[in-house]
Amino acid sequence: MRRAKALGGEIVVLGSGGARKVPEGFDKKRALEQFSELCRELGPRAAEAGVTIAIEPLNSKEDNLINSVAQGAQIVDAVAHPNIQLLADFYHMFEDREPTQNAADAGKRLKHTHLADLGRLAPGFAEGEADFVGFFAALRAAGYDKRCSFEGKTHDLASQAAPLLATMRARYAGEGEKGRGGEGE
């Protein structure tokens, strides 16, 4: 965390599905307790380093412990440390058909967001489009006005970056296609 801060980082994402996978036969409730205990230990260390840890819920194909923004918010509340907060990743929400309302309900717990389009592609380059307009509306409802990063596949980032940003700015403004939402079609 000190190294991340030294490089100018403010947020450290805690989202590795492989690292937090609950082994078959292990009590999931106990695994959640252990994860919360870890976060309680990390909170003061993050504060000392001057960073915030953002818990990232992942879709159920990639993780079997924290699969929704709502569940992540419960963990943040249980840990109750200002340096342990939440990330909403629209790709994972969409994959598990999680309602965008969960991002709105997360409110001030949100410290970072990720997005990608259908197939984990750059927004504007997929066939069809996820409901970015709805996701951005949920973020506004949450009072979230911070960072939002793309996390996914590109074919040529140099040529795709400008159209990706233009697409996201238009969807943030509520313009363009209203895509398919995370909670149903």
Image (cartoon, helix red, strand yellow):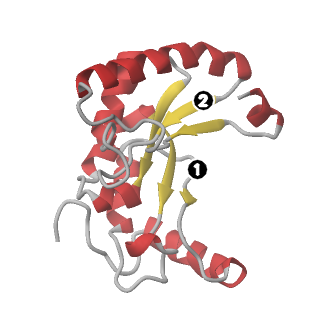
Q: Quadrant of the N terminus?
A: top right
Q: Is residue 179 above or below residue 94?
A: below
Q: Is residue 161 left or right of residue 184?
A: right
Q: Secondary structure at mark 2?
A: strand
Instruction: Look at 77% across and 27% down and name the residue there.
Output: 2
Mark 1 closeness class: few <14, some 14–19, many ≥20 residues within 10 Å: few
Gap between marks 2 and 1 measured at Cα: 13 Å
The residue under label 2 is 52
Which residue type does callout 2 highlight? Thr
Side of 6 where 64 appears, left or right: left
Disc 1 on helix, strand or loop?
Answer: loop
* Residue at x 23%, y 58% (from the top left corner): 97
Labelled pair 2, 1 in contact (Cβ < 8 Å): no
Quarter of the picture containing the C terminus is bottom left
Name the quadrant containing residue 61. bottom left
Residues 143 and 17: in front is 17
Q: Is residue 65 left or right of residue 148?
A: left
User: Which residue occupies the foreground of this view, 31 or 108?
Assistant: 31
- In the image shown, does 14 or 86 lie closer to the viewer? 14
Residue identified by numbered label 1: 147
Q: What's the mark number on residue 62? A: none
